[in-house]
Image: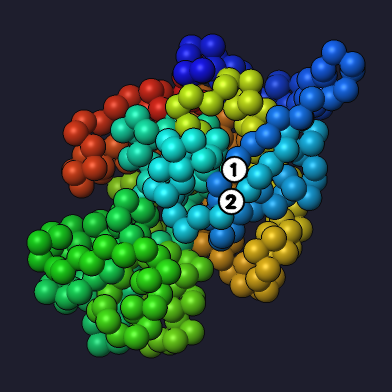
């Protein structure tokens, strides 16, 4: 069914702390008293931001607790997941801040925030020491992602536009290879992929990061749903995410270990990746919703996306973030 006021109200209720007590009741039951199980196709990105809640939910059996069976699929970026949502291949997915324009444009709904990112970088080959030196340079960028966002902001800071550089759209994995082989002069990319590049190019230069623009814009990461996912399923998934957030907040080291195990990566690599972002818990998100902070974040991002040509106008955040819907 299409998302309706009923769904929005249901998710607004999930955002209230009182619903956590209800979460212990788990899934529904069929006519024979057996607990029913509903399948969830869930997308994620293979870094700490995009994987940690999935790793916690798996280990803590939160899916089972809420009557869900998860089929998780890894993606390289948020826009690909939104495409999969609209194709019916996913029910839910994870996006970084650079892809928030997609739900803002009506292609998905944000069901939960996750963290504030600081993992994005503009990197350049050795010898390029200033953003203004990017003029005329070949720059790799995954379109519509946070790598695109950080590059656009960095060019603006330097008084440059996309017309002043040679933008080369490519996926994140291709950027790793292209930068390492010297085929591109710079890139908009994020950690932990930046570390992978550093292994081949230890003398690369970081020209810009999220923190450089903290006074201008926030960089929230989020989980999204398709526009026609059933309300009851979404309510359960939000409950899983909230409980996983709170476990992550209370057990940072364990969450890093669980994520490393799921990603099959060294714990110290995942720990370094986790340090690039501020993880949020359910109470913090609820507080930021109540005091208007979340609406301010999303409105600020909307202004950026309008200026960057991603959106024709800046929509009301409550039209695409279900936690703000009344």
Task: Place residue 305 in its image quadrant.
Answer: top left
The reply to whether discs 1 and 2 touch (Cβ–Cβ < 8 Å) is yes
Residue 159 visible in this rendered orientation of the protein: no
SS of the residue under disc 1: strand
Identify the residue at horizontal 75%, vertical 52% (top origin): 251
Q: Label 1 crowding class (10 Å Cα cut-off): few <14, some 14-19, many 20+?
A: many
Task: Place residue 146 in its image quadrant.
Answer: bottom left
Horizontally, residue 63 falls left or right of residue 137, namely right
Residue under label 1, please give it.
42
As displayed, is residue 87 above or below residue 290?
Answer: below
Which residue lies most toward the right here? 33
Residue 290, how many percent across, how many down? 51, 24
Residue 218, how many percent across, how many down? 39, 46
* Nearer to me, 4 or 71: 71
Name the mark on residue 15. none
C-alpha gap between disc 1 and disc 2: 6 Å
Q: Which scheme is used to colour this image of the protein? A: rainbow
Q: Label 2 crowding class (10 Å Cα cut-off): few <14, some 14-19, many 20+?
A: some
Task: Place residue 66 in its image quadrant.
Answer: top right
Residue 313 visible in this rendered orientation of the protein: yes
Residue 29, how many percent across, how many down? 82, 19
Horizontally, residue 38 falls left or right of residue 279, namely right
Identify the residue at horizontal 57%, vertical 29% (top origin): 286
Identify the residue at horizontal 54%, vertical 11% (top origin): 6
Precedes in sequence: disc 1 or disc 2: 1
SS of the residue under disc 2: strand
Identify the residue at horizontal 79%, vertical 20% (top origin): 28
Residue under label 2, please give it.
73
Residue 235, how many percent across, how many down? 63, 25
């Amino acid at each position: 069914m299409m998302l309706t006021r009923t769904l929005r109200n249901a998710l607004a209720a999930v955002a209230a702390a009182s619903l956590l007590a209800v979460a212990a009741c788990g899934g529904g039951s069929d006519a024979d008293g057996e607990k029913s199980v509903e399948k969830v196709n869930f997308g994620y990105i293979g870094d700490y931001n995009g994987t940690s809640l999935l790793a916690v939910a798996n280990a803590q059996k939160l899916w089972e607790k809420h009557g869900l069976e998860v089929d998780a699929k890894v993606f390289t970026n948020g826009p690909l997941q939104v495409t999969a949502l609209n194709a019916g291949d996913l029910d839910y997915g994870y996006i970084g801040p650079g892809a928030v324009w997609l739900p803002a444009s009506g292609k998905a709904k944000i069901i939960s925030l996750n963290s504030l990112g600081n993992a994005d970088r503009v990197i350049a080959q050795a010898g390029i020491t200033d953003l203004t030196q990017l003029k005329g340079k070949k720059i790799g960028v995954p379109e519509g992602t946070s790598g695109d966002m950080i590059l656009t902001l960095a060019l603006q800071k330097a008084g440059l536009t996309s017309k002043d550089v040679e933008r080369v759209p490519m996926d994140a994995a291709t950027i790793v290879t292209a930068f390492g082989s010297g085929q591109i002069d710079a890139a908009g990319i994020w950690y932990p992929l930046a570390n992978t590049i550093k292994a081949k190019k230890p003398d690369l230069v970081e020209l810009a990061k999220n923190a450089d623009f903290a006074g201008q814009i926030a960089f929230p990461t989020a989980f999204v749903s398709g526009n026609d996912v059933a309300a009851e399923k979404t309510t359960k998934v939000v409950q899983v995410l909230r409980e996983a957030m709170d476990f992550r907040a209370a057990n940072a080291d364990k969450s890093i270990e669980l994520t490393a195990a799921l990603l099959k990566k060294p714990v110290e690599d995942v720990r370094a990746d986790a340090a690039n972002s501020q993880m949020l818990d359910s109470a913090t998100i609820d507080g930021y919703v109540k005091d208007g902070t979340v609406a301010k974040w999303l409105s600020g991002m909307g202004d950026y996306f309008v200026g960057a040509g991603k959106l024709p106008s800046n929509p009301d955040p409550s039209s695409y973030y279900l936690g703000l819907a009344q």
